[in-house]
Image (tube, coloured by chain):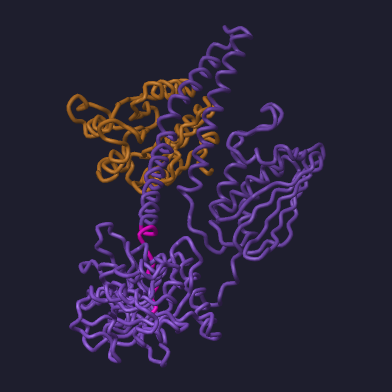
Amino acid sequence: MPHSPSTSSAMCGSRGEPQLGSSDGECGLPREILLVEDSQGDIRLIREALREIGGDHVLHVVNDGVEALAYLRRKGIYAAAPRPDLILLDLNLPRKNGREVLSEIKADERLRAIPVVVLTISTAEEDIMTAYRLRANCYVIKPVNLDQFFRVVQSIERYWLSRECSPEGAPYGA
Amino acid sequence: MYRSTRNGISSEAPAGSYGSSLDDGQNMTEAGRDPYRIVVESLNEGAVITAPDGTILFASPRFAELAGSDPTALIGAPFELSVRPEDRGLSRALLHDGLTDRTRCAVRLGSEDREPVPVCLSAGPCAPGASAGVSIVVTEPSRQGQTADLLEDLHLVRAALDLAADPIVVLAPDGRVRQANRAARELAGRDPVRLHLEEAFPLDSTSCPGPAGDSALPRNGPFDGLLASIAAGEGLRYRTSDGRGRTLRMEAAPVKADDGSTGYMAIRLIDDSARELEEHRLRQALEDAANAHRDLQQFAYAASHDLQEPIRMVASYLQLLQRRYRDRLDDDAQEFIGFAVDGANRMQQQINGLLRYSRVTSRGKPPRRVEAGEALAEALARLRQRLADTGAEITTGPLPAVMADPVQLAEVFENLIDNALTFRSESSPRIRVEGIREGDMVRFSVRDNGIGIDPEFHDRIFQMFQRLHAREAYPGMGIGLAVVQRIVDRHGGRCWVESAGGEGSTFFFTIPFAPVEVEGS
């Protein structure tokens, strides 16, 4: 079982696309995270995990795929929404599922540079393969164990939102 | 008065007159009797004269004796009533042919309640023209040595044919049925002798492809088609049109006649209806199985998403509670949370186990040639940490190539070795893996020096969620061996365990042997 949830696996692909770097998330500014998730339990767990890690995060939450794309494209009430440094995307979402959201993000030139971490319960290989084919930057299976869950969120934060601003270390170095 | 001439009965004579003249004859004095009649009645052979419709006009006392009847009772009765029911078709054919030609056949005489009397009938026209009657000479073969043996043989062969489950008929060169066994009579619903094949077993002309499946049978019956199909070495399939929609398959072979000609044809009619029904049922069952399989797939997907989500919530928030409020919870509260978290974790593992189990078939790949050693190496790589932790020593014997899904073969090794590591004894685990070819299969064995298994439980351990030990003593969900069993089943092999308890266990499983690959293929 290569993708057993009990062994909290975070299978990460390429670490963003630095050459397309944005000016967002420079040193000293809070990191903007967009969480696309409909489970209130999971939203709260991620919020708690980030709180334990500490650091300067702003967590924006939308509950379905349509809202996620509206946020990213700054439509309607999201006209002033900040561009996220990281998207945490659940696969099973109401209205528009995570796969569709992922494929639209990666097809949009202005959005495709934002790293997307697929955060899901699905251990189904076809879901994992689909996510990577749609160029998810990372596929994380939500662990049952809370300690493992917190560690996963922590490692995502360290990996994708590193505070180091060296050209090598920063995914969005200026 | 019975006025027989050398040419037989005069065709002008009214049929009824024979009967009355015979009555007269019985009242006559010896001296006044017809000399022909005296000759006929003194012969060892029986003699019968019938009208064209088969009604007996004259029967000699010898015939009456053979038929077990009274001569006077026979007059006016159909000749075939003297013949055993199963041979009546033959006697009808004889009387029909006897109107125009001299013809012979062997039948059994007598009513159902007495021993049948095998006789040879020789029939011919009483006078030229089919409207004259038929004269029949009845020879009792027991007085004729060789003929008797032949007739006996004939009856034995017929009796044997009657035992055959498939209907068998012999067609004469004119396309009419000459012989039919019991199954053929039952299939036709009557005695098919003398009938054309397509009369006896009506063809559905819309669905009777010839041997090549191209054309309907010729209008004059299947005989030509049969000849062609025999030449092509094939049978002929067609449907009957008796409203029951039976499908008959015909297999035919030429039969040599006495004179060496091959105008006769033996035909086996195989009623395929039952088989087609069975095939239909099989198709239905396969469809049902496919539906069930799809349902299981959907269940598996639901289980992997929808069921796990709430369990995860229960476990996570209990743990969060424990984490945040550790200082404010007393020992009991800590313990309760511990049990609750443990329960949620186990449920999670059980769902994953069920998923693993269901994926054996849903994710299984078709078997291909696999080096068993490579599958074992894969399994050992995955168990590297456990092997290191337990200080296990693995030795291997021969490991031949087999026909298997490589991923699943590795999973079998992994589960069996993992099992051996779990149920280790005090001493450090020593495990030997090897495969011995036995005919078409390779019998693999995984032998350990662990705690062993009481023979009482040897069957149970392969069942889902069956555990023999407290979870605290030996961890595990009781899934590994069930998965092993399912994988081995899927490969057409079997698995079992041998263990005397306390002396280690040896798990065996068989997988089809893979013949050596042809070079370049």
B143 left or right of A109 in image: right
Q: Nearer the viewer, residue A157 or A128?
A: A128
Q: Residue at x 48, y 72 (%)?
A: B117
In the picture, which chain is purple?
A: B
B470 left or right of A112 in image: right
* A115 up-or-down from B408: above or below: above
Quarter of the figure that contains the N terminus of chain A: top right
* A25 up-or-down from B162: above or below: above
Percent across and percent down for residue B486 are 56, 47
- Residue B501 lies in quadrant: top right
* B306 up-or-down from A41: above or below: below
B283 left or right of B511 in image: left
Say if residue B419 shows up in the picture. yes
Percent across and percent down for residue B263 are 35, 87
- Residue B2 lies in quadrant: bottom left
Q: Residue at x 32, y 42 (%)?
A: A113
- Residue B60 is covered by the magenta coloring: no
Q: Nearer the viewer, residue B310 or B170?
A: B170
- Magenta residue span: B266-276
Chain A: its colour in the image is: orange
Say if residue B211 shows up in the picture. no
B475 left or right of B109 in image: right
Q: Nearer the viewer, residue A32 or B473?
A: B473
* B261 up-or-down from A24: above or below: below
Percent across and percent down for residue B369 are 56, 64
